[in-house]
Image (tube, grey):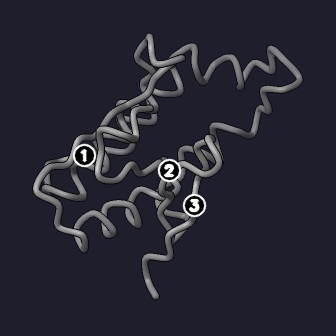
Amino acid sequence: MQIENSTEVLLASFLTARATAGYIKNRNPELVSIVAMGILSQQQAPEDEYCGDYIESLLTKKPYDHVEALRAILAHETAQKFLRGDKVYLPKEDPSICLQCDLFDFALRAQRQDGLVEAVKINVNG
């Protein structure tokens, strides 16, 4: 994550997508880059790609179908390894929780603190 080359870096998920989009709209930046991190930043992961699509739709009114996104995400190995219970550290409940939209009304900003990158909660509605 190259924070140095960005004015601001936000961390988003389906859970915070609407709040993140609202924060971006309120800031009204000249340029917004949506980067899906994927698997170790080397392979695409459908949940990240679709989350980016969802945030883009919130910002631009571009059509987005969450049911179709869920079909594609849940069929992919990145979700299947959780659903099968392959490893004890991959909870089966993870996809059903993480793929819900807009459960939280805050955004997360990545910022440097003492040489580390930390996530800082940004209250969007108040």
- Which residue is found at the position 31% from the left and 69% from the top? 22
Q: Is residue 110 left or right of residue 81?
A: left
First in sequence: mark 1 vs mark 2:
1
Nearer to us: label 1 or label 3: 3
The amino acid marked with disc number 1 is Tyr
Residue with the mark numbered 2: 110
Left or right of 56, for residue 109? right
Which secondary structure, mark 2? strand
Residue 4 coordinates in the image, percent (x, y): 36, 40
The location of residue 121, given as percent across then percent down, is 56, 65
Asked which secondary structure carries label 1, the reply is loop
- Return the x and y of residue 100 as percentages of the image width and height: 53, 52
Question: Which residue does the numbered mark 1 point to in the structure image?
Answer: 64
Residue displayed at 46% across by 88% down:
126
The residue that label 3 is drawn on is: 120
What separation in Å lies between label 1 and label 3 (alpha carbons)? 28 Å
Earlier-in-chain disc, 1 versus 3: 1
Q: Quadrant of residue 89?
A: top right
Q: Is residue 123 left or right of residue 35?
A: right
Between the C-alphas of marks 3 and 2, the distance is: 6 Å
Mark 1 against mark 2, which lies toward the viewer? 2
